[in-house]
Image: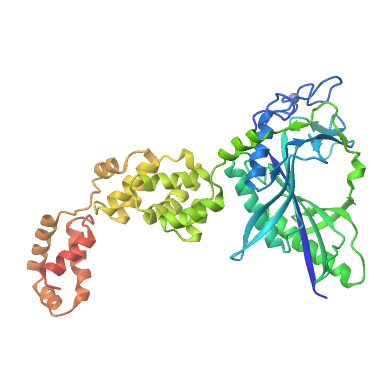
Amino acid sequence: MEYEAVIGLEVHAQLLTESKIFCGCSTSFGAPPNTHVCPVCLGMPGVLPKLNEKVVEFTIRAGLATNCAVQERSVWARKNYFYPDLPKNYQISQYELPICLDGWLDIEVQGETRRIGITRIHMEEDAGKLVHDPGQPVSYVDYNRTGVPLMEIVSEPDMRTPEEAGAYLRTLRDVLVYLEICDGNMEEGSFRCDANVSIRPMGQAELGIRAELKNMNSFRGVVKALEYEIRRQRAILDEGGSVKQETRLWDADQGKTFGMRGKEEAHDYRYLPDPDLLPLVVDTAWVERARQALPELPAAKRERFGEQYGLNDYDAGVLCASRPLAGYYEAVVAAGAGSKAAANWVMSDLLGALKAAELEIIASPVKPDGLAGLIKLIDSGAISNKMAKEVFAEMMASGKAAEAVVAEKGLSQVSDEGELEGILRDIFAANPNEVEAFKGGKKKLMGFFVGQVMKATKGQANPKLVNQLVNQLLGG
Ligand SMILES: [Zn+2]
């Protein structure tokens, strides 16, 4: 039997606000346990939540960038459950009336564009973190994360392969990072994904029974977990069994999913409107302001880079990987470097050096005009490509301008025609046999003459110019 997989993804993205969603506590990561807490996020009796406007602003941006309709009125709900990391015994979320509905995102898979529907986006607070001490009969709880703002983005079950799921996640992550509302770090948990997956016989409209997969902490993990789960479900159906609706945990070390618990239904949580928070009203003017302030998004930027700078898809993709990187590249070109040369230098030398030094692009010791200066020295023939590598390494180390490094190291390429001509005439005089042979058609001797000039100038002659002069003087 041929089967088709049906995949939907739920992404939890942590919003990059400085304070929590309903109190003024810091959201910064890595503080000692229970130091970023107050009576509100600890759920003390009598306290009231106060909504952080930035959370709404960021979610509106996400909704607009994913083609959602931003709702004028949305409602806060309590999702009730008991767990030690949730001090109020309920999580404030949005349920029936979320802030964003009915969007979509275009993804590219094997050169083809597919449109994936986005059901909804809502805001909610994060829970705390349980810390288990192996070997000790105790568990600890850290409430620093309690109340950190999250956005949940629920897709339609529009994906058919694990590869499409991976492409959707990357596309969504890139959009959120471009919007500067989430750092997109999956390993650290600021961009988390749960996947719903079922399979059905090819051509059947009715959906199969789905499993929810959790605990994937990389894009690769999501793809692997889905591949495993599709195989597992197919084996069950092929044997005439039926798939159980349940939540399953991905174990990256074993490469398998394990049943955790029966999947809860919404009614298990007894969602109730939160009486402490008024319905949220977002007027059209607010949405329009947010729309005007949207940055150019990754797909549009890649397309523009292709057209404006003549870059191929791969190069445009690398350079548009982040806004700071794309901005850096554009600044190099604006400072006078050719667009192809700038792309090559940024993608290979600069990114390689930054990676080795563990630096972000904004902290690069070589600024865009510095790199443009170096490229212009190569273009003018003042230094060779080989010398440029040496100059660049020194610029990275010292932060000095290309011209200064060239002067200090005496690296300047000899591009003075008169000087090179004099050197060449001496070489010709000393090597009459080679001159005759060259004139007689033995063009391979070009390498010999260039080598002699390099020797005489300690490698600083402009090889292109030497070539030209040899041909000119010996009538080649
Ligand atoms: Zn607090």
Residue 85 visible in image: no
Residue 432 visible in image: yes
**Closer to the camera, 463 or 449?**
463
**Closer to the camera, 71 or 451?**
71
Q: How is the image coloured?
A: rainbow
Q: Position of residue 142 (x, y in %)?
A: 77, 31
Count all numbered tags in the image, as a single digit.
Answer: 0
Give the quarter the ligand 1 occupies.
top right
Q: Residue at x 42, y 58 (%)?
A: 310
Q: Is residue 132 above or below residue 24?
A: below
Q: Position of residue 418 (x, y in %)?
A: 10, 56
Q: Position of residue 391 (x, y in %)?
A: 33, 47
Q: Is residue 73 above or below residue 338?
A: above
Q: Is residue 380 above or below residue 199?
A: above
Q: Residue at x 81, y 32 (%)?
A: 141
Q: Is residue 382 left or right of residue 51?
A: left
Q: Position of residue 326 (x, y in %)?
A: 48, 47
Residue most extreme to the front: 284
Q: Residue at x 36, y 47 (%)?
A: 392
